[in-house]
Amino acid sequence: MRRTIGQIVLAVVFACLALNGFVEVISAALGRSHEPAALVALQALAALAGAAAAWSTWAGTRWAPAAALLYGLMAAVLVASLTPILGLPPEASRGLWVGAAACVLFGVWAAWYLRRSLRRTAV
């Protein structure tokens, strides 16, 4: 399978996002951070979704767009959940909702791009 530059870049971006999530989870497991368990669980789920998106994008699987969309949704849930999990003031939630929307938009865009580019490279 021939990969486009965009597919390579997206695979690397998803891999970096997954790695970041796994570092946070491992840090919490080793006792180096005192994050709430709910936050660590959401970070683990987002990291797993990012790893699936990275691998499927690199491999050019037909489910790569779904994995990209799943990552965007998981990241959005993580960001939107920060206010109640961390007990942040209500004024902080406005910016977090914008961040959550950006995560969804990134996932939707990546899914659209992968669907389009994987169809072209499969031919």
Image (cartoon, rainbow, N blue to C red):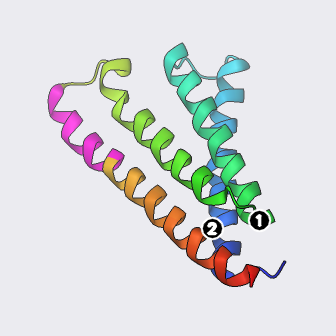
CA gap between label 1 and label 2 equals 8 Å
Residue drawn at point x = 48 percent, y = 56 percent: 107
Number of marks in the image?
Answer: 2
Quadrant holding the C terminus: bottom right
Front residue of 11/2: it is 2
Circle 1 sits on which residue? 58
Q: Does the magenta stretch include residue 99?
A: yes
Tag of residue 12 = none
Q: Residue 10 carries which label?
A: 2
Element carrying mark 2: helix
**Residue lying at 75% horizontally and 79% vertically, measured from the top left:** 122
In what element is the residue under mark 1?
helix
Give the prevailing secondary structure in the magenta stretch: helix
Q: Can residue 46 be seen in this view?
A: yes
Residue 12 position, x and y percent, is 69, 64
Residue type at numbered disc 2: Leu
Contact check, label 1 and label 2, Cβ < 8 Å: no
Q: Residue at 37% x, 28% y: name it.
A: 81
Vertical comparison of 119 with 75: above or below: below
Q: Where is residue 55 in the image (x, y as percent from the top left)?
A: 76, 55
**Residue at point 64% right, 56% down?**
14
Residue 83, given in percent of the width and then of the height, sits at 30, 26
Q: Earlier in the sequence, mark 1 or mark 2?
A: 2
- Segment tinted magenta in the rendering: 90-100
Quarter where residue 30 is shown: top right
- Residue, far right: 1
